[in-house]
Image: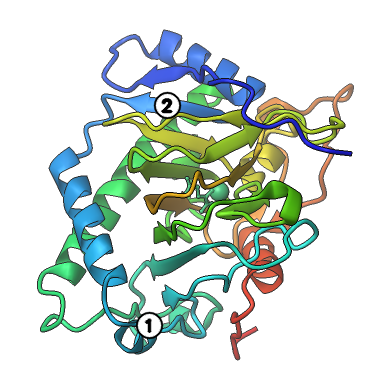
Amino acid sequence: MGEANGHGDNNLACVDMSSPDLTTTAARLRQACMDVGFFYLINHGLDLELLDQVFEQSKNFFALPMEQKMTVLHDKNHRGYTPFEEEILDPAKQSKGDSKEGYYIGREVPDSDPRSKKPLHGPNQYPSSEVLPGWQETMERYFDEAMKLSRRVAGLIALALNLDQTYFDKPGLLDDPMAALRLLHYSAEESHPGLGIYGAGAHSDYGMITLLATDDVPGLQICRNKDAVPQIWEDVQPRKGAYIVNLGDMLERWSNGLFRSTLHRVVNPGVERYSIPFFFEPNYDCVVECLPTCCSEDNPPKYPPITSGNHLLGKYKITHQGFKSDKV
Ligand SMILES: O=C(O)CCC(=O)C(=O)O
Ligand SMILES: [Fe+2]
């Protein structure tokens, strides 16, 4: 059965973080999270000049000769460079890996910290400051800002789930989060869904929320109903100054399926493309299970509890050819 592609532009809801009317903002967010799990976030307060610098520095890194990029190849903690086609987000449908290269930056955990014994925890890798001056500092500044914004969004999500705004500030949930900044560079290879060639194969994100910044090249598509035959894919237009926020699997589980973690992919029109997702995931040991406001006698929990860390590890093992951790 074929697929219907590019059914016009979708109209995602817009959540304005500068609005003083939290009740209306939370209601709008709730509707967007129930309908599609994707929305534009505007007036978010994150310094757009800093974001521009991150895009510039991302381009500088990917423009380096391959030998130099390979010196920071992703390591056992999943930090560093991932080459073209290393990742296959949708192994069932792809004839080869995603036509993109990437760079993972996580939370800095020094080797002397006991948490560095945990999978996916450890120090970051950075290209040398002689080769790319200011690169590390730009990434660290952005990482901190994206963390702060993610926490603010988590507060709004709590309100949207009829919880106290500070619900996710409780110890053990997001106080030691598995956050990851990822730089992505798509080659100009045109995607051909019929041939299994994609910029990024279909997937839903794994964690709590993703703050996605893209350049102005289209390509991101969402599928509201993954079970429809054929699947209908809608374009998500890039929007200057806004984040495209989407919910991950763990929020779907926390909300007992009320909030959706929606399938998306990148079908490249045949132009180079850069994007910067920031994945904000609960603590490694956080047990993700149905929230108190999302279940009742008539609506029992649909998903068994999982830990955030195990869920992420399981996904990385399936989708990253080169992922090897001796800590697993
Ligand atoms: O590049 C994009 O627009 C989307 C990337 C994405 O979905 C991901 O990395 O999870
Ligand atoms: Fe994604």
Residue 307, by quadrant, is bottom right
Q: Residue at x 88, y 25 (%)?
A: 297
Relative image position of residue 76 (x, y in whole percent): 52, 85
Local SS, label 2: strand
Contact flag, marks 1 and 2 (Cβ < 8 Å): no
Local SS, label 1: loop
Residue 306: which numbered mark, if any? none
Q: Amino acid at mark 1?
A: Asp
| Mark 1 vs 2, N-terminal side | 2
The quadrant of the rendering that contains the C terminus is bottom right
Q: Amino acid at mark 2?
A: Tyr
The answer to whether residue 54 is left or right of residue 34 is: left
244 in relation to 196, above or below: above
Q: Nearer the viewer, residue 259 or 86?
A: 86
Residue 243, by quadrant, is top left
Relative image position of residue 293 (x, y in whole percent): 67, 26
Relative image position of residue 42 (x, y in whole percent): 32, 24
Could one spot residue 117 in this view of the protein?
Answer: yes
Relative image position of residue 219 (x, y in whole percent): 50, 41
Residue ID for mark 1: 113
The answer to whether residue 157 is left or right of residue 319 is: left
44 in relation to 276, above or below: above
Residue ID for mark 2: 40
The quadrant of the rendering that contains the N terminus is top right
Q: Nearer the viewer, residue 165 or 121?
A: 121
